[in-house]
Amino acid sequence: MDLFEKISSLDRRWIFLVIALSIFIPLMLPFTQPLSVSPDVRAVYEALAALPEGSTVLCSFEYGPSTLPEVHPMARSVLRYLFQRQHKVIVMALWPDGLFMSRDILDEVAEGEYQAEYGVDYINLGYKAGNEVVIKSIAESFSRTYPVDTRGQSTTSWPIMHGIENLANIDFIISLSAGYPGTVEWVQYAADPYNKPMTTCCTAVQVTEVVPYVRSGQCAGILGGLAGAAEFEVLLMDEGWLTELGAGNRGMASQSVAHLVLVLLIILGNVAFYIERRRQRKF
Amino acid sequence: MSETIGIWCAAFLTLAIFSFLYKDNPFYKFAEHLFTGVSAAYWMSVAFWSQVHPNLCGNIWWPEAFVRRFLEFTYVWVDRVELDGQTYAANALIDGSLTPEMIQRAELVNHVHVMYYIPLILGILFFTRLIPKIAYLSRWPLAFVMGMAAGLRLYSFLQSNAMEQISATIAPLAGTPTVAEALNNLVVLIGVFTGLVYFYFSREHKGLFGGLSRVGVYFLMVSFGAAFGYTVMARVSLLLGRFQFLIHDWLGTMTGAGG
């Protein structure tokens, strides 16, 4: 059995092991990969930077623990920027798990890092079932859709909600999305019909689905997957909003090595396949 | 302590799922069944407590004695509390701002909306599937859901996915700020046109038509490749997340550095 036959009949567990090592080893080494910021990531920053201080920004959490490693770093960076710019942040969730994700991030960033005051600087409206119907509903009224917040108090009793009747009073929408309902629904039911500017921080799987809305200008830029998170951190640091890179960049070296290994394996597999097919034709 | 136990449970279940990569085994089966069972219960619980309980139950009539008897459970059904000319929010019933004696005297105001009996009846009709003789009734709520979803989505799809996307596709080729942008617009136009030709099945794909269709296939392959690449990136990120958890959180509990 020659090398190419061996490759063709390789036990796939060896491939699993190689991938695992390609992620594990760079993770243990203390280096980060230099990154350049893509135009789509810069567009997200420019859209947020264009907002005057004290704007009201709606952040919708549409992801859960299964996509936490990808979306959490983006949520963290975006909220850090929003609180530094003194924006008012209204948080809601279209996924049940999104409620726990939002609590986790708000505890860390809003309360832990910026000592933001609940009900004044930010509010967590929580999860409401209904998918896109919830978006249509807040377009008419926040208080009817969310009579109480996650603390069980009347939504309208908090200062941050004074003057916020419906979507018309929101300056910008950020969708932290990992699927349905998510960015696509925000474009279809909020951004387009009500002419609201929005952007998205989504999983890599969603990028090809969302990019057409970015190209057409329906969505201002896109942070896609861990790479998007890492680039946004670099950009925030370049602009002086962050003092150190975060979780997005910590994983990028592993991500790049794993991609490289996968590309090599794909090339090797294809070469072995073609050589073996040519040999079979000869006989 | 409870957090450490949680981390150990999560680490055990992560390793149990990873063990499938070697071969199927009882640890993997255990983790898989546990996940399925907990997920089903979790979603059912979330659906009831976040939707049925506050929205439906809060808008239909209940005997006041029942509401008062189970206040911790039923207070969210109350719209407001009236007492001695003052109005309180419903959570005053459980947060200690009203004494038991005051609650006894208070009037619990609840808005009953007749409209909410329609989803209640339609929801109950779903369960008729369990009785073969009247199982056909379960089609009515299904028809309602399908009709509503189609109506709701039609307009949005037409605006966001058809009109806006067509408008973005017909981007100007001349007069763009840069040549690269003009080329980009041209590539988009060719990609959309040839992609549509590939999906036109009323004519045999031969000659010029076949050539255009083949170009469309190449564009489709590029888009599938991009989708696959992003999917790989996403899956590697998730694996990375698990590794970071195992290294920093789980091993951290042993070394005292994390957890």
Image (tube, rainbow, N blue to C red):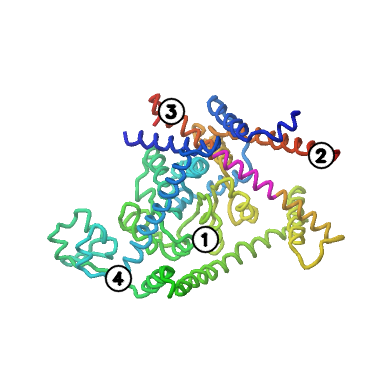
Residue linked to disc 2: A280
Which of pointers 2 and 1 lies earlier in the amino acid sequence?
1
Question: In 3D space, how far apart are the residues under numbered discs 4 and 3 (Cα atoms)?
Answer: 54 Å
Residue to which mark 4 is pinned: B111
Q: Is residue A217 left or right of residue A173?
A: right
Q: Nearer the viewer, mark 1 or mark 4?
A: 4
- Tags 2 and 3 both on a single chain: no
- Using the rendered view, name the quadrant where residue B164 is placed: bottom right
Are callouts 2 and 1 both on one chain? yes
Residue linked to disc 1: A190
Tell me which label, 4 or 3, sits earlier in the chain.
4
Q: Measuring from the top left, give residue A79's x and y in whole percent.
A: 46, 44
Could you tell me how far apart the alpha carbons at marks 3 and 1 are, in whole angstroms?
A: 44 Å
Residue stretch in magenta? B223-237
Marks 2, 4 in one chain: no
Coordinates of residue A272 in the picture (x, y in percent): 75, 35
Q: Compute the Cα span from label 1 to label 4.
A: 29 Å
How far, Cα to Cα, is label 2 from label 1?
58 Å
Q: Amino acid at mark 3?
A: Leu
**Disc 2 to disc 3: CB gap under 8 Å:** no
